[in-house]
Image (spheres, grey):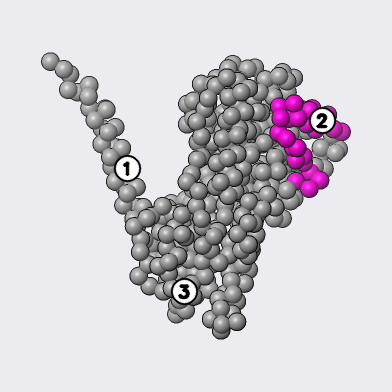
Amino acid sequence: MPNILSRIPNSLSFLSRKVKARIDYVKNLQVVSLKPNQPAQGNVLMSYRIEPFLLKPGQPMPNDHTWYWEVWQIAQTFLDLGYNVDVIQFHNDKFVPQKNYAFFVDIRHRLEALAPKLNQDCIKIFHVDIANMIFRNAAECNRLLELQQRKGVTLRPQRFETPNLGIEYADCATVLGNDFTVNTFKYANKPMYRIPISSPVVYPWPEEKDLAAVRKNFLWFGGSALVLKGLDLVLDAFAQMPEYHLTVCGPISNDKEFEKAFYQELYETPNIHTHGWIDVSSPEFIKITNNCLGLVYPSVSEGQAGAVITCLQAGLVPILSYESGVDVHDFGVILNNCSIAEIKATVHRIANLPIEELKLMSRKAWEYARANHTREKFAQAYRHAVEQMREMRETRGRGE
């Protein structure tokens, strides 16, 4: 007779998945309604992340992505300006507007679906946190094709999304990114307000860091879609440079196909140290950044890479692609073509700069992040953009 008890763990696992799926389903259909501490002057609808508004009292805000705090701050901006705010999950395709909205903020696909159902004087805002989807899908596929030709292995896209037409239905956009990000949406000829991405953590200046001791140590730090973010290129480059060390921080184990294809580089190459996912607020992350000179991040498509800004906050010298969405001015390097040869040459050149020059670049990177990428800066820039949009709405209301 089969051992029924042996089946219990799998049954519990199945039930657990069903419960989670049910919770997600309910969450995705939920509407969170917030009210200002003053008489309301109108309503705002936000299609974004709903999780921050479902936290229990005392429960910390997730810091594995900047958008959790940022959506909370966007809602707070409208509340401070005297609006009621309704928030739905960005893939809630069941919601139908039942009231007039002064503003509608969307991050993905709801704008084109809901625009015809909104009152005519609603200002529709497309919130851009990634490059245009057509560009990003093509960029990831091109990287995967290059990898296939280089290594003889086919990996599947990790970030493919159905292209949305949000910018085409919007009246304007708020954009996290640099000229690269803006230019992928420029075709729509819509007003765009740049907002600096925030940092979940602001670190003190690493006063005790010994740059002479760590000058040959570098970091790759990023999220999912590892080929899109250039980890394969960085691994191949450092595998050919045994005198330099690379630490890898990111959700490697979540992509089993990539992990299998690069198992030797990730786990059997003496100068490559794979850490995996890491909490940026942990002492362990500070220890890693204090043991590295710079960040190597040849992503081929971003809005504005939060991982890069986090590393600037830690004083790392950036070696980046233009498509990372972050400008490095005089404290880092923007790669021209992100080839393995260029990555190797750039790492070698940076590592062999005079210590005083490296100290200056590190300090400038840290100061730039402190001056431009804090939660305070995000809040200020977003409020300023909304105030300009209010003027747009008033002008429209006067028929000008």
The residue closer to the viewer here, 78 or 227, is 227
Name the residue at 64% across, 38% down.
299
Badge 2 or badge 3: first in the primary sequence:
3
Q: How far from the left and from the top, in percent, is residue 47?
A: 45, 59
- At which x and y percent is residue 254? 47, 31
* Residue 58 seen: no
Q: Which image quadrant for residue 189?
A: bottom right
For label 1, the SS is: helix
Question: In the displayed structure, would residue 184 be above or below residue 126?
Answer: above
Q: Is residue 264 left or right of residue 48?
A: right
Q: Amino acid at mark 1?
A: Lys
Q: CA distance from mark 2 to mark 3?
A: 57 Å
Q: Residues within 10 Å of mark 3 (few under 14, many from 20)?
A: few
Residue range (magenta) = 328-354
Q: Amino acid at mark 2?
A: Arg
Residue under pointer 3: 120
Residue at disc 3, secondary structure: loop
Task: Look at the image and say whether residue 73 sits in the magenta stretch.
Answer: no
In the image, residue 31 lies at what x, y percent? 36, 61
